[in-house]
Amino acid sequence: MKELTEEAIPGLIDRGALFVVNHSGGKDSQTMFAKIRSQVPREQVHVIHAHLAGVEWEGVIEHIEETCRGYSIQATSSVAPSRRRSGMN
């Protein structure tokens, strides 16, 4: 796979690429979202949060919704399959 450079972003935008930002709610995610938001049209940005049950801090979903207001946001639950269901012993 070819490395994505900042110089390649305008060409991807022109071709209608969808930019997916994985957002945990932390500083790194917020910085990446701010960088993408500054360069990519709103309709080409989709934010995903994989909710990790039992380890998320309270209010993380609300925080992401607040900081990403107006953008397409999807929160999913991440549940690891049990060893028995996956066929592992």
Image (cartoon, grey):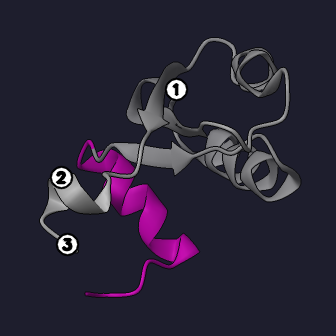
* Residue linked to disc 1: 42
89 displayed left or right of 30:
left
Residue 49 vs 20, above or below: the answer is: above
Closer-to-camera residue (78/36): 78
Over which residues does the magenta segment extend? 1-16
Residue 72 vs 22, above or below: the answer is: above
40 falls in the magenta region: no
Quarter location, residue 58: top right
Residue 36 vs 10, above or below: the answer is: above
* Residue linked to disc 2: 85
Identify the element where label 2 is drawn: helix
In x, y percent, where is residue 63? 82, 23
Write the residue at 61% across / 36% down: 53
Q: Amino acid at mark 1?
A: Arg
C-alpha gap between disc 2 and disc 1:
40 Å
19 displayed left or right of 60:
left
11 falls in the magenta region: yes
User: Which numbered marker is on residue 15?
Assistant: none
Write the residue at 83% across / 48% down: 26
Q: Amino acid at mark 2?
A: Arg
Closer-to-camera residue (15/62): 62
Of labels 2 and 1, earlier in sequence is: 1
**Quadrant where the image shows the N terminus:** bottom left
In x, y percent, where is residue 36? 62, 49
Q: Are circles 3 and 1 on residues that touch, CB within 8 Å?
A: no
In x, y percent, where is residue 75? 50, 26
